[in-house]
Amino acid sequence: MPLVSWVCGVFPALCFLLYFWGRNIDPLTDVALVLKCLLRQKPVAVELSCGAGPSHVILELGSPLLLDCNLGSSDTPFNVTWFKDGQLLPPAPGDHQYLSNGSLLLLPTSTDSQPPKNVEGSYSCVSASDIGALTSRAVNVLYQEPSPQTVIIGGFARFECQMTGVPLPVITWQKDKVTIDDDTRFIYLPNGVLQILKVTKEDEGIYQCVASNSAGKDISTEARLTVTTGEVFLVIVVPPQNVTVVLGHPAVMECMAQGHPKPFVSWSRQDGKPISTDVIVLATNLVIRDTRRHHAGVYVCRANKPKTREFVVAAAELHVAGKSDVWVIM
């Protein structure tokens, strides 16, 4: 008997439909990954499938999350394994718990009312039996939400949009319900981030991102930008963050510095190797369109105050993970 499989979400907006147990699989009804947010009130259920559904979940502070892996027929026993950021997630207790039905319960912990980071990541599951294996699409579990900002005139503002979909949506931004015109001070990054350079009083207002694709349009919650006056000191306001990226996917390492006069920002690798020529510098950020293994490493952002020896640095590590295992016909 041949070993066949269903692989969903290995590449953006692309699914591979093979032949499973003598019949075609309907990607909208037969294969799904169901997520239930265990909130204080009525639980919320979100269904992920090959053709529709979100690829991320924004959690509320203190809310556990139950991931249900419903990939196979209820008549066939399946062994379920979970992966986080492309790595096998052991069943050991801690910030997660394997349940007897194959579900995964995430148990975030936090201190001082700060959003917990221990459960953030990209999750996927694999259901295997003696007749085949099913691999779910990945879902990103995040605690990031738009939030109000107060910025000094001449400083920097940053808003993040986490909306994704299939097909991959086009992200645009609005200020006070009006689409933002082209402006060199507004930087749009591939990870959905909007950066505003040299903020002016006219930039004050309500910001929202809009995600549009063939399935429709979605608008984010509102985030207010308040602009004040004051002295601008040399500081890295948005340092780079440690990130794990799947091989072949884009990577972004942000670094936003402010000061008076405007600081000069440069990048280097901690190991002394030159930064690859295929790495793009967009404003003061590093962008890698097609991540390869040689891109992995620790990157250092340095902001220098012009005509002085004053500087500040921040560093973060880029990990490059291989694509999840893909089962093929044997």
Image: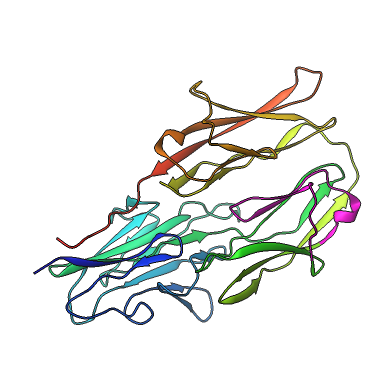
Q: Quadrant of residue 321?
A: top left
Q: Is residue 56 left or right of residue 155?
A: left
Q: Nearer the viewer, residue 317 or 191?
A: 191
Q: Residue furthest left?
A: 1
Q: Is residue 257 magenta?
A: no
Give the quarter of the figure containing the N terminus. bottom left
Give x and y (percent) for residue 266: 66, 28
Q: Is residue 264 left or right of residue 226?
A: left
How is the protein colored in the picture?
rainbow
Q: Is residue 159 left or right of residue 142?
A: right
Give x and y (percent) for residue 153: 87, 45
Q: Is residue 86 above or below residue 49?
A: above
Give x and y (percent) for residue 185: 79, 47
Q: Nearer the viewer, residue 303 or 108?
A: 303
Give x and y (percent) for residue 279: 55, 36
Q: Is residue 124 above or below residue 193?
A: below
Q: Nearer the viewer, residue 22 or 42?
A: 22
At x 38%, y 65%, the residue is: 137
Q: Nearer the viewer, residue 190 or 240?
A: 190
At x 85%, y 57%, the residue is: 204
- The range drawn in magenta is 179-205
